[in-house]
Amino acid sequence: MKFSRRAEAVSPFYAMEFGKHAAALEAQGHHVVKLNLGEPDFGAPPAFLREVRRISDGRPLPYTGALGLDDLRRAIAGFTTEHFGARVAPERVVVTTGASAALLLSCAALIDPGDEVLVADPSYPCNRRFAESFGGRVRLLETSPATRFQLDAQTVADRWRPETRGVMVATPSNPTGTSLPHTELVELCGTVSERGGWRIVDEIYLGLADDGPDGPPRSVAADDPGAIVINSFSKYFGMTGWRLGWAIVPEAMIPVAERLAQNYYICPPTPSQVAALTCFEPETLAVAEDRRAQFRARRRLVLDGLERIGLDVPVRPDGAFYVYLDVSGTGLTSSEFCETALAQAHVALTPGKDFGDAGAERFVRLSYAASEEDLALAIDRLGDLMNRI
C-alpha cells in the first residue's frame, strides 16, 4: 500500500508516544506518574454528567445543524461576553467536534497550497499539521524566554513575505503555559490585518489564564472582529473525551464554515451539545473556577519543587497547566532526559522536539493536570533521579 506524501511527512506526536511507553510499564506492574498529556484529572462537571444520564434514555438524538445547536451557540456567545469581555453575535459561533475540528475548518477555509503560515517555535504541533494538510508551508519563527516564548508584532512584521498569508497564535500557549499580554496580542493582529493576512488565535486555555494588570483574561475577539478565535470545552470545563469545541468567525466566514462542516463531519456530537448547555449555569461555572484555583495551587507546588531539585524554569507560566523546563544543565538532551525519567523514575514527560526546532533538545514540557499527590510524588522521583545523573 502506498501512502500519501502528507501522511509520510507527519512525525509522531511524542506526548502520545511516551504515553504508550508509560502504559507498557504500567502493564508490567509499575506505577507511572503521567505528566505527558494536557488532560485535566477532574473529569466532566457533575451537572454535565447528570444531564448526559438524563438524556441517555433512548430518546432520539438526531443530527443538529452543522454549526451546532442554536441554544448552545447563544450560550457560548453569552459566556464570551461575560467572561472574556467580547460581545459576539451567536451567529458567529461555530460549534465543532473539539477545538481540532475548529482548526480543521479554519485551515480549510483559509489556506491554499503554497501559502506561507507563520507559527511560533515552540508551539502545539497539531496546529501546524492542519495547515500543512491543506498545502500550507509553515514557517516556524524562533521565540525565546525574553519574549515569554511568544511572537510579537515586530517579529511578524520583520518576517512577513509576499507569500505569507496568515499567522497562528496560541495564548496561553501549549507547551510553555505563557500568555501574550492582551494589548500586544491586539497589536500583533493589527500588524497582520494591515498586510491583508488572516489570524487564527487559539484561546483554548484562556479560561485558565491568570488575571492580568487590567483584570480578568480578555479574548482578542473583543478588539479584532476579523480574527478566527478557537476555544474548547476540554480544558476549562475538563471535558476532553466529549469532543466539543467552538470557533468565533468573521461574518463572511459563517456560510463557508457551514458548508465545510456539513461535508467533513455533518455536526458535532448531539449528546455532548445538549449536555454542554449545563456548563454555563452557575453551578458548573463555580466548579470550573474552583478547578482553576486548584491548578494555580498545583503550579506553585511544581515550580517550588522543580526549583528545589535544581531544574530550571526560565519563564514562569501564567496560564494553562504546563511548565517548560530547561534540562540542559543535566548534560542530557530533552529526549534522553524524558527517556531516563520514564525508565528510571517512572515519570512520563514530553520532550521539546514535539513542539518545534528551537530548543528542541533543551526543553521538556511537564503537565500539572494531575493530582497534587501525583505531582509531589513526581517531584520526589525526579529529585532522586537528579541525584543520580
Image (tube, helix red, strand yellow):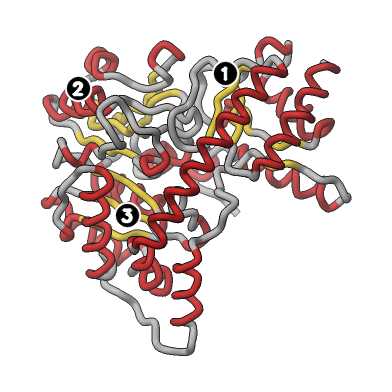
Disc with the residue nearer the chain's start (3 vs 2)? 2
- What amino acid type should be assigned to the residue bearing mark 2? Pro
Q: Position of residue 323 (x, y in %)?
A: 55, 28
Q: Earlier in the sequence, mark 1 or mark 2?
A: 2
Distance Cα–Cα, label 3 vs label 2 = 31 Å
Which SS class for mark 2?
loop
Q: Nearer the viewer, mark 1 or mark 2?
A: 1
Q: Nearer the viewer, residue 104 or 56?
A: 56
Residue 337 lies, with reference to residue 61, above or below; the image says above
Q: Is residue 127 visible?
A: yes
Q: Which of 321/13 is in front?
A: 321
SS for tag 1? loop
Residue carrying label 2 = 162
The image quadrant that residue 188 belongs to is: top left
Q: Which residue carries the number 1 mark?
A: 313
Label 1 amino acid?
A: Val
Q: Quadrant of the C terminus?
A: top right
Q: Residue furthest right?
A: 29
| Residue found at x 46% / y 55% | 287
203, 236: nearer the viewer: 236
C-alpha span from label 3 to label 1:
32 Å
* Front residue (pair 362, 71): 71
Q: Is residue 142 above or below residue 199?
A: above
- Give the amino acid type for the residue marked by disc 3 in the picture: Trp
Q: Residue at x 39, y 36 (%)?
A: 209
Residue 246: which numbered mark, if any? 3
